[in-house]
Image (cartoon, grey):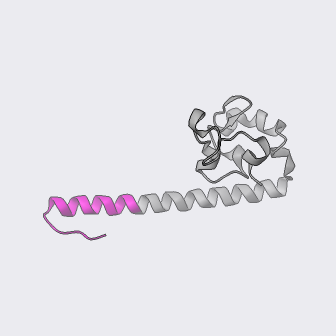
Amino acid sequence: MNCWEVKKCGRQRDGANVHEIGECPASLWNAGQACWLVAGTFCEGGVQGTFAKKQYNCTRCDFFNRFDLKHRLEMHKKFISNKIKDVAERDKLEVIIEAAKLAAKAGDQFWI
């Protein structure tokens, strides 16, 4: 279950409140089960900051407290692993784009 299903905030992708206040970063990062790890989530009536800034609110949250420590650690590992993959893919794409720009400057054709 994702945080937006419990909290009923309507800020998930295609949610009822997305047009008013935007899509929540937890939804954007596909981290509805690990929202406490995502900066900028919309909780307690306002945008939360980094984990260090929102930690107190998270530890009081009914959604956060649904999970035991072992489950939260597993979600943390999964979230971090996915972010590393995202960064690696983004880096690969940037390298390809830079190579294409250099090839274009040199007058070479470059096929992706």
So how many labels did they put on this image? 0
The residue at 81%/45% (across/down) is 63
**Residue range of the region highlighted in magenta in the rendering:** 93-112
Give the percent coordinates (x, y) of residue 22. Answer: 57, 38
Q: Which quadrant holds the N terminus?
A: bottom right
Measured along the vertical axis of the image, is residue 96 above or below residue 49? below
Q: Is residue 105 magenta?
A: yes
Q: Residue furthest front?
A: 16
Q: Nearer the viewer, residue 81 or 44?
A: 44
Where is residue 12? Give x, y as percent: 65, 46
Q: Position of residue 105 (x, y in %)?
A: 16, 58
Q: Is residue 60 above or below residue 64?
A: above
Residue drawn at x 71%, y 28% as measured from the top left: 45
Q: Position of residue 44 (x, y in %)?
A: 74, 31
The residue lying furthest to the top in this view is: 45
Task: Choose between 9 and 56: the one closer to the eye.
Answer: 9
Left or right of residue 37: residue 18: left
Q: Residue at x 24, y 58 (%)?
A: 101
Answer with left or right where residue 108 lies relative to residue 68.
left
The image quadrant of residue 61 is: top right
Q: Would you say residue 62 sits in the magenta stretch?
A: no
- Most common SS among magenta residues: helix
Classify the position of the C terminus by image quarter. bottom left
Which of the 4 quarters of the picture holds residue 42? top right
